[in-house]
Image: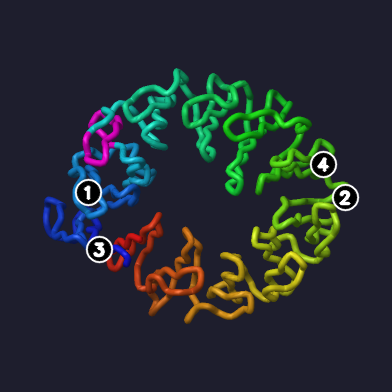
């Protein structure tokens, strides 16, 4: 049974609150629902949600109970360019969250609201209690929740790449792990990262001047032999696609350490998906070849709307008549008669015949919905649908099989990690946890 918490959120209009009361505290509370009167509400994460009255902010737990009162001042750095409050950087991770003081500095509190790190930094990005990126004026340091430095490096810049971090030290680039240790020393003038989610592995093209090479590895990295002076453009399923200095296409399998070049000259080539590579000939037509460069699916599709195969062996293709779906043998799954087609999962497709109304269909073209919608978007394994009723726009949620999860009766919907935030009316929201 789904656990549900109902939120009534007070919206500020012209600085006035729609719900009576100047204390902006709870109007009522029970185990299953909580009525709130806060003009600003942020993300729900790690069992907490941040709220603000526009001047100060605080945190609530998953039952809507105050972990902290609204006692932390809203800083100028928390406001977007148009002056509106932006709470997207304030949320709990691993039992800790940032708080502010009038000095303009940030510190950390724990799940009970107790201070664990005094406010001394300009910005904090929490990865875990053991790894926090802290900004001090123009530079960055790596600390834990106790404020202890993970290393003695003063970083000019840092970028999160999966579980690794691309860092800039003394104008040179390197890579660190979550222990603050260098896995690639900062000796390079430039680095281009590639992260493959499917294999949870990384590639880095590194440059010293105009000379380049490729690092590959997981916890430790080594230069891949023979991959100098190349132009990588894709890294998927453990296969690096690149062109050499002569413009020839290659595919390097990092799992087997094998490098394969394509002898034929392609205007463009993609990566291996379901054993096939999307290739484009001199007439700008798309076909698909296998690992032996045998043409499996002839050159016949238009470049603009034709895509790679998915892991489940289906691809979106475009012809002069429209857009459809084929399988890895070239057989038609969905006729190319649509104006737009998106693969949600195998045999589940978002389609539109006119560009104005959208539907969810199966491999036979049969609609899985009881109505069409003016928009359907994929969000965290759900589909958010937009309906137009009597000139009003409302939103709902359906699953990938077309079952209605949330009726399209809401003014706004946020799909989060195991929660929906639904706006029922101007000052009433419903938070569903699952």
**Foreground: disc 2 or disc 4:** 2
Looking at the rendering, in which quadrant would you find the C terminus? bottom left
Task: Report the front residue among 72 and 434.
Answer: 434
The residue identified by callout 3 is 6
Colour scheme of the picture: rainbow
In the picture, residue 351 is in which quadrant? bottom right
- Asked whether the beta carbons under mark 2 and mark 4 sit within 8 Å of each other, the answer is no
Distance of label 4 from label 1 (alpha carbons): 58 Å
**Foreground: disc 4 or disc 3:** 3
- Asked whether the beta carbons under mark 2 and mark 3 sit within 8 Å of each other, the answer is no
- In the figure, 11 relative to 368: above or below? above
- Asked whether the beta carbons under mark 4 and mark 1 sit within 8 Å of each other, the answer is no
Q: Secondary structure at mark 4?
A: loop
Q: Secondary structure at mark 2?
A: loop
Please give the range of residues in magenta.
99-114
Residue 53 is tagged as 1
**Foreground: disc 2 or disc 1:** 2
Q: Earlier in the sequence, mark 1 or mark 3?
A: 3
Q: Callout 4 environment at 10 Å: few (<14), some (14 to 19), or many (20+)?
A: few
Q: Is residue 173 left or right of residue 434?
A: right
Q: Callout 1 environment at 10 Å: few (<14), some (14 to 19), or many (20+)?
A: many
Say if the magenta span includes residue 80.
no
Q: Earlier in the sequence, mark 4 or mark 3?
A: 3
Task: Report the front residue among 418 and 375.
Answer: 418
Q: Earlier in the sequence, mark 2 or mark 1?
A: 1
Q: Is residue 23 left or right of residue 392?
A: left
Q: Is residue 37 left or right of residue 76?
A: left
Residue 253 horizontal/vertical position (percent) = 73, 43
Q: Earlier in the sequence, mark 2 or mark 3?
A: 3
- In the figure, 427 relative to 246: above or below? below
Q: Residue at x 23, y 32 (%)?
A: 115
């Amino acid at each position: 049974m789904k656990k549900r918490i109902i939120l009534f959120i007070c919206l500020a209009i012209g600085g006035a609150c729609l719900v009576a009361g100047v204390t902006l505290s709870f109007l009522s509370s029970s185990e299953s629902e909580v009525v709130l009167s806060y003009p600003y509400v942020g993300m729900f994460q790690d069992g907490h949600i941040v709220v603000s009255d526009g001047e100060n902010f605080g945190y609530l737990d998953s039952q809507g109970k105050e972990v902290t009162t609204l006692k932390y001042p809203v800083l100028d750095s928390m406001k977007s360019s148009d002056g509106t409050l932006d709470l997207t950087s304030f949320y709990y991770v691993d039992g800790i969250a940032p708080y502010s003081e009038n000095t303009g500095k940030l510190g950390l509190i724990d799940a009970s609201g107790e201070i664990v790190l005094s406010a001394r930094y300009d910005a904090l990005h929490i990865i875990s209690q053991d790894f926090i990126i802290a900004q001090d004026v123009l530079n960055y340091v790596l600390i834990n929740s106790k404020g202890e430095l993970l290393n003695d490096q003063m970083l000019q810049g840092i970028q999160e790449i999966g579980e690794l971090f691309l860092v800039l030290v003394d104008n040179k680039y390197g890579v660190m792990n979550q222990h603050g240790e260098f896995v690639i020393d900062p000796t390079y003038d430039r680095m281009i990262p590639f992260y493959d989610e499917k294999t949870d592995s990384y590639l880095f093209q590194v440059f010293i001047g105009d000379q380049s090479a490729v690092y590959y590895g997981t916890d430790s990295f080594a230069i891949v032999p023979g991959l100098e002076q190349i132009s990588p453009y894709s890294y998927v399923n453990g296969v690096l696609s690149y062109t050499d200095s002569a413009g020839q296409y290659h595919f390097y399998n990092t799992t087997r350490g094998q490098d394969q070049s394509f002898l034929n000259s392609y205007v463009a080539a993609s990566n291996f998906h379901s054993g096939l590579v999307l290739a484009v000939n001199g007439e700008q037509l798309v076909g698909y070849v296998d690992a032996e460069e045998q043409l499996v699916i002839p050159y016949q599709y238009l470049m603009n709307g034709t895509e790679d195969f998915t892991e489940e062996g289906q691809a979106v293709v475009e012809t002069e008549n429209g857009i459809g779906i084929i399988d890895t043998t070239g057989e038609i799954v969905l006729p190319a008669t649509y104006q737009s087609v998106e693969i949600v999962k195998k045999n589940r497709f978002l389609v539109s015949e006119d560009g104005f109304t959208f539907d969810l269909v199966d491999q036979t073209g049969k609609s899985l919905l009881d109505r069409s919608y003016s928009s359907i978007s994929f969000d965290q394994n759900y589909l958010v649908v937009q309906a137009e009723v009597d000139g009003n726009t409302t939103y709902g949620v359906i699953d990938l099989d077309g079952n209605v999860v949330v009726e399209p009766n809401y003014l706004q919907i946020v799909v989060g990690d195991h929660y929906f935030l639904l706006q029922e009316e101007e000052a009433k929201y419903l938070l569903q946890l699952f």
